[in-house]
Amino acid sequence: MPDRQIVVHEDAAKLAKEAADWIARCASQAIAERGRFLLALSGGSTPEQAYLDLASPRFEGKIAWTKVLIFFGDERFVPPNDARSNLGMATRTLLSRAPIPYGNVFPIATQTRTTDEAAEQYETAVARQFGLSDTSPPPALDLVLLGLGDDGHTASLFPGNPSLGIKRKWFAGSPPGVLPPPVDRITATLPMLNAAREILFLVGGGKKANILKSILESPDAATKYPAAMVNPSRGKVTWLLDKAAAALLTQR
Ligand code: 6PG
């Protein structure tokens, strides 16, 4: 059973501040131990404030950005300048503000014909950073940020989605789930997520309280909800929540 931790903060602002602190601490530790920090960003709206904080004067000189490699846990199959693009959101909130070398950012290219082509291209690009072939087992990223949809999805792994059954690929094309935006996606697969050293879920707001209780406290959660299937074999899972999202939890 992976090491699972639940941390609850007063409100969204404190959740974002703690998330930024958490990422900075992980970066320092990974760089001290292995010379670089391998981070996968999440999309959605929850992480935006944490990304802005990471790029703020509060962290000036505190993160060795030249030693940070930035990947993406998923992407919408839209151009980077589309308002729905996760790369676009990360660029607006972090990548255009922090002194991150251009060559340290590995976006999921979405100008391919199909999402499967995009996923294959991305897997090859990620493998290159590890000197691996894409037939190897997935590499261990130091920290993977994930969000939670109120249908229990995470990254772009949606309930009942064929990509949940993928055993060997690291990234895959994924049709839209039931929640907006209704666009095709590219997503890290469960083997890729479960190879991580640490998963950090950022979940805020009362809208997520019901699904969060199901995921963290229902015995059969891992048979239904993709977020509950994220169980890194050698890593730890931390759920960083605000009080509104954690309101229905009985176990802390
Ligand atoms: C995406 C994300 C997705 C997101 C959740 C939560 O591309 O949208 O990868 O998994 O994290 O849907 O989104 P919010 O943070 O906007 O609630």
Image (tube, rainbow, N blue to C red):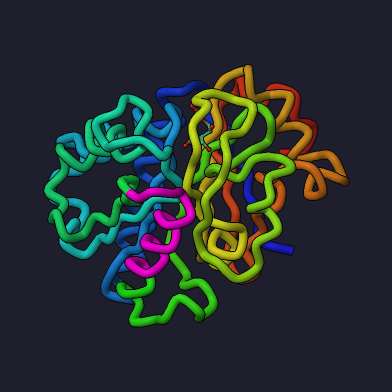
The span picked out in magenta is 112-126
Q: Is residue 38 visible?
A: yes
In x, y percent, where is residue 246?
A: 66, 27
Dividing the picture into quadrants, the one containing residue 17 is top left
Q: Quadrant of the C terminus?
A: top right
In x, y percent, where is residue 210?
A: 74, 24
Query: Which secondary structure dominates the residues rendered in magenta?
Result: helix
In x, y percent, where is residue 201?
A: 54, 43
Q: Is residue 215 left or right of residue 22?
A: right
- Residue 122 part of the magenta-drawn span: yes
- Residue 182, compared with residue 135, is above or below; it is above
Q: Is residue 22 left or right of residue 178?
A: left
Q: Is residue 67 left or right of residue 29?
A: left
Dividing the picture into quadrants, the one containing residue 134 is bottom left
Dividing the picture into quadrants, the one containing residue 169 is bottom right
Query: In this orientation, which residue lies closer to the viewer: 241 or 137?
Result: 137
- Residue 183, compared with residue 130, is above or below; it is above
Which residue is pictured at 14% across the width and 54% down the height?
102
Q: Is residue 53 visible?
A: no
- Figure label count: 0
Residue found farthest to the front? 113
Q: Quadrant of the N terminus?
A: bottom right
- Residue 113 part of the magenta-drawn span: yes
Which residue is pictured at 35% across the width and 77% down the height?
130
Which residue is pictured at 38% across the width and 58% down the height?
26
Which residue is pictured at 51% across the width and 37% down the height?
202
Q: Is residue 42 left or right of residue 5?
A: left
In x, y percent, where is residue 91?
A: 23, 37
